[in-house]
Amino acid sequence: MRNFTTVQDIGNLETALEKARYVKQNPYADSALGKNKTLLLIFFNSSLRTRLSTQKAALNLGMNVIVLDINQGAWKLETERGVVMDGDKPEHILEAIPVMGSYCDIIGVRSFARFISKEDDYSEKILNQFIRYSGKPVISMEAATRHPLQSFADLITIEEYKPVARPKVVLSWAPHPKSLPQAVPNSFVEWMKAAGYEIVITHPHGYELDPRFTEGVKIEYDQDKAFEGAHFIYGKNWSAFADPHYGKVLSTDRNWTIDSRKMDLTDNGYFMHCLPVRRNMIVTDQVIESPRSLVLPEAANRVVSAQTVIKEILLGL
Ligand code: AN0
Ligand code: CP
């Protein structure tokens, strides 16, 4: 594997899960693999889990790690070619990327959708410039359209807890005051489809995701009905995808908040969320604190997904 940006990059999922189980059971087995190799993590956006778990994964593999927050201490970057740079951005991304690439062996990038241009977001303009100009393998740490390290951790977690071979997994929209990307739900659907689970998406009208991700997936606008018989409820907010409301909040209806009454409709289902989560908007205190909540093991598995991915890339260097 060279780059890790979509489910396709990881190859066969059974094999990937096998490798992840090995990494989880033997976290220090490859502590010599990353000797004298440097992982550079570039953050255009905030992070707690991705920042820590990806560093921890690299340290377990014996790598050196450098972290840069673009918005805290680096020069502001111009991203458009052809711009007369007489404004507030002293550096162009077309110099910054190859420079960053020259200081590392693998590069991780977090660059959320900016909601300025849907075309730029959905063509992964920033991430693809890193792939093209850094000269180094690139790991997506949540880009504009996907969050594959999260989805891989979600898959690992579902495999650990599933009560049946092919569980019913429900992705449920839930309310949030701010506009959030579609990356986590897009990616989750992409990975759940690849895993062959029964997947149902529930959201209010107007929150349809990009059909390129949801093709062939059942959409149920009645949240209660969607929850019936579910083994896993994956809560997440996202903003509208469809024009003319791309990136907009269309509803903050708290009737969609995931509460105990709704969880009781499931087949003793587990609650999942990638975190960070706004309590009593997305999910009630009671549900997130219940024994059926998997948010902490799910977050812990972020080390496993990152370490499995970095190990594969190191093996291919
Ligand atoms: C981000 C999102 O929804 O994509 C990151 C989640 C991992 N969430 C927020 O910005 C709150
Ligand atoms: N789930 C996740 O990616 O969290 P952070 O945004 O804190 O990294």
Image (spheres, rainbow, N blue to C red):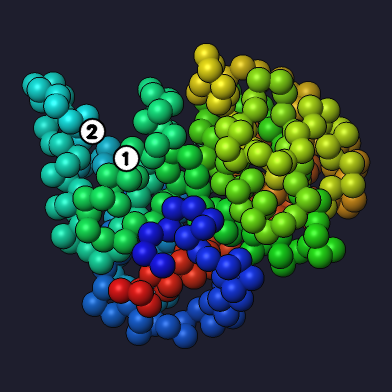
Q: Where is residue 77 in the image (x, y as percent from the top left)?
A: 20, 35
Count neighbours of disc 2 (C-alpha within 10 A) and say few if under 14, some if 14 to 19, many if 20 or more.
some
Q: Nearer the viewer, residue 266 or 279?
A: 266
Q: On residue 79, which mark appears?
A: 2
The earlier-in-sequence mark between 2 and 1 is 2
Q: Position of residue 93 (x, y in %)?
A: 19, 40
- Seen in the picture, residue 278 relative to 254 is either above or below; the reply is below
- Seen in the picture, residue 116 relative to 10 is either above or below; the reply is above
Number of disc labels: 2
| Residue 287 visible in the snapshot | yes
Discs 2, 1 touching: Cβ within 8 Å: yes
Q: Which of 21 and 17 is in front in this view?
A: 17
- Left or right: where does residue 100 sit relative to residue 211? left
- Seen in the picture, residue 25 relative to 101 is either above or below; the reply is below
Give the SS element for disc 2: loop
Count neighbours of disc 1 (C-alpha within 10 A) and say few if under 14, some if 14 to 19, many if 20 or more.
many
Residue occupying the far top of the picture: 244
User: Residue at left 57%, top 80%?
Assistant: 22
Give the SS element for disc 1: helix
Residue type at numbered disc 2: Thr
| Residue 310 visible in the snapshot | no
Q: On residue 126, which mark appears?
A: 1
User: Residue at left 66%, top 20%?
Assistant: 206
Q: Does the residue labelled 1 lie within 8 Å of ligand 1?
A: no
Q: How far apart are marks 2 and 1 (CA)?
A: 8 Å
Looking at the rendering, in which quadrant would you find the C terminus? bottom left
Image quadrant of residue 225?
top right
Q: Where is residue 252 in the image (x, y as percent from the top left)?
A: 66, 20
User: Residue at left 47%, top 60%?
Assistant: 9
User: Residue at left 22%, top 29%?
Assistant: 80
Looking at the rendering, in which quadrant would you find the N terminus? bottom left
- Left or right: where does residue 4 sit relative to residue 270? left
